[in-house]
Amino acid sequence: MQGADDLTFEWDFGDGSPVVTSTYYSGGTFPFTATDTQAHTYSMAGRYNVKVRVRDDDGGTDELTLIVNIY
């Protein structure tokens, strides 16, 4: 069904820690909206590229990269 995609969020915090993945299932609902929030603690000061990629179950993807400065 068009628009009723399951969505997977992949968070890469840029510090070598494991990628955090969350999947939300639409259950065939259209339209379907999902929101994902993650918390992360950095062990060292530095500049990190935080990437979040969202994939749907049809192969569509989108990605956002944020630069985080930890002092």
Image (cartoon, helix red, strand yellow):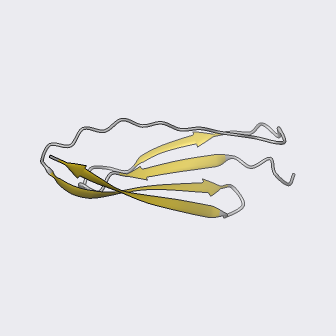
Q: Quadrant of residue 39?
A: top left
- When the figure is inspected, residue 29 is found, relative to residue 6, above or below; the finding is above
Horizontal side of 43 relative to 28 (left or right) equals: left
Give whichever of 22, 15 is nearer the camera.
15
- When the figure is inspected, residue 41 is found, relative to residue 17, above or below; the finding is above
Q: Quadrant of residue 30?
A: top right
Residue found 87% across the figure and 51% down from its top: 1
Give whichever of 40, 68 is nearer the camera.
68
Residue found 49% across the figure and 59% down from its top: 64
Horizontal side of 21 relative to 59 (left or right) equals: left
Marks counted in the figure total 0
Q: In which quarter of the image is residue 55?
A: bottom right
Horizontal side of 1 relative to 62 (left or right) equals: right
Residue found 20% across the figure and 43% down from its top: 42
Estimate the x, y position of residue 43 in percent, counting from the top left: 14, 43
Horizontal side of 68 relative to 45 (left or right) equals: right
Estimate the x, y position of residue 18 in percent, counting from the top left: 32, 50
Residue found 48% across the figure and 36% down from its top: 37
Estimate the x, y position of residue 29 in percent, counting from the top left: 82, 38
